[in-house]
Image (tube, rainbow, N blue to C red):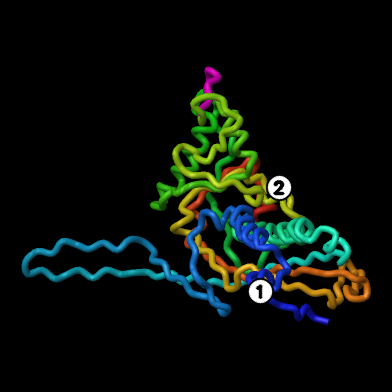
Amino acid sequence: MPLTNATTLSGLDAAGVLPKPLVDQIWKNLAYTSVIQKVSGTTPVSITGNTSMTMTGDLVAGVVGEGEAKPIVNAKPSLKTFSPIKVAAIMYWSKEARIANPSGYLDTFTEELTQAVGRAVDMAVIHGKNALNDSFISGVEYLGQSTNVVELGTAAKKDGGLYRDVLDGYSKVVEADYDFTGFVADPRMRVALMGATDIDGRPVFQTAPNLADGMDTMMGLPVAYGKGVAGKIGAVADTGTRAIGGDFAGNVKLGYVEQINFKRTDSATLIDGGETVPLWQNNLEALLVEAMFSWVIRDVNAFTVYTDKVDEAATTPAG
């Protein structure tokens, strides 16, 4: 039997399935777990997909003297299509467990499902992968395809060390005529920044040693941290990526066809790892979360990928 008890998040709230404080927390958690949603531009996306047009090169108007012909300039438009994908996850529990602790139990399950959507967004946009089985998503562009790669630790400390590595990546982007608006980074990058010192042992990215420092800026630009940057989620191994910097607002557009949506049932039959689970017969309840989203990247080379170790096998689809 299909999951027919479909409703929106506000519908679940109105029906009393979720306490009001929990409803508000769900949206907060999604924004927290998806690092890409924090930094990208957003746009509405239709179920059939949108088309985004960008121009190649800059149009330049020329000076015209008296009696001279006005120049003709040529534009080269580039079209990219939003192709929506759906992500979904199901969790189930016993009715007795919910009755024993309704707010706390649903709180834990719903937060986990919501974070699963956020992780799926990051894995798709950053690595082009399905975290469930480590497969590449067909026909999509992702930030890890950038040819601008800087391996952290390349520059010797006497030549600037980590500071020089970050600056080299910055240069690759701005020299390609793109803005550099900020970074997304693996949490381990925060530790690397804290530990960076000059040849005299003085902190490079801090005025004084401070373990409570969030390191939310790097050389004056904002940094958003998320575990999806490294890619070690679900079946996906660590790609070695520690940060990605570049023009997020101008080159990445993310949109939802359908915002995060919940469906609840106690009468469906689930297949869990090959085992058939009839919810009604076993007095179980299930909650499904799903979302449909899409994105376009104007140019993957508007970004630099900072790595601990370049792993081509992890960042390039086979074939």
Amino acid type at mark 2: Asp
Residue toward you, 114 or 281: 281
- The mark lying in front, picked from 2 and 1, is 1
Residue toward you, 197 or 272: 272
Q: Residue furthest left?
A: 66
Q: Is 192 rendered above or below residue 59? A: above
Q: Is 23 rendered above or below residue 280? A: above
Q: Residue at x 50, y 71 (%)?
A: 44
SS type, badge 2:
loop
Amino acid type at mark 1: Gly
Neighbor class of circle 1 (other Cα within 10 Å; few <14, some 14-19, many 20+) is: some
- Residue 203: say if magenta: yes
The number of discs equals: 2
Residue that badge 2 annotates: 238
Q: Is 175 rendered above or below residue 207? A: below
Q: Are marks 2 and 1 in contact (CB under 8 Å)?
A: no
Point out residue 64 in the picture as x, y percentages from the top left corner: 13, 64
Mark drawn on residue 91? none
Point out residue 73 in the picture as x, y percentages from the top left corner: 27, 68
Q: Residue at x 59, y 53 (%)?
A: 35
Which SS does the magenta portion mostly show? loop
Q: Quadrant of the N terminus?
A: bottom right
Picture quadrant of residue 37: bottom right
- Would residue 142 be found to the left or right of residue 219 on screen? right
Neighbor class of circle 2 (other Cα within 10 Å; few <14, some 14-19, many 20+) is: some
Q: Residue at x 19, y 62 (%)?
A: 62
Point out residue 192 in the picture as x, y percentages from the top left corner: 60, 34
Residue range of the region highlighted in magenta in the rendering: 198-204
SS type, badge 1:
helix
The residues bearing labels 2 and 1 have C-alpha atoms spaced at a distance of 39 Å
Residue that badge 1 annotates: 11
Q: Quadrant of the C terminus?
A: bottom right
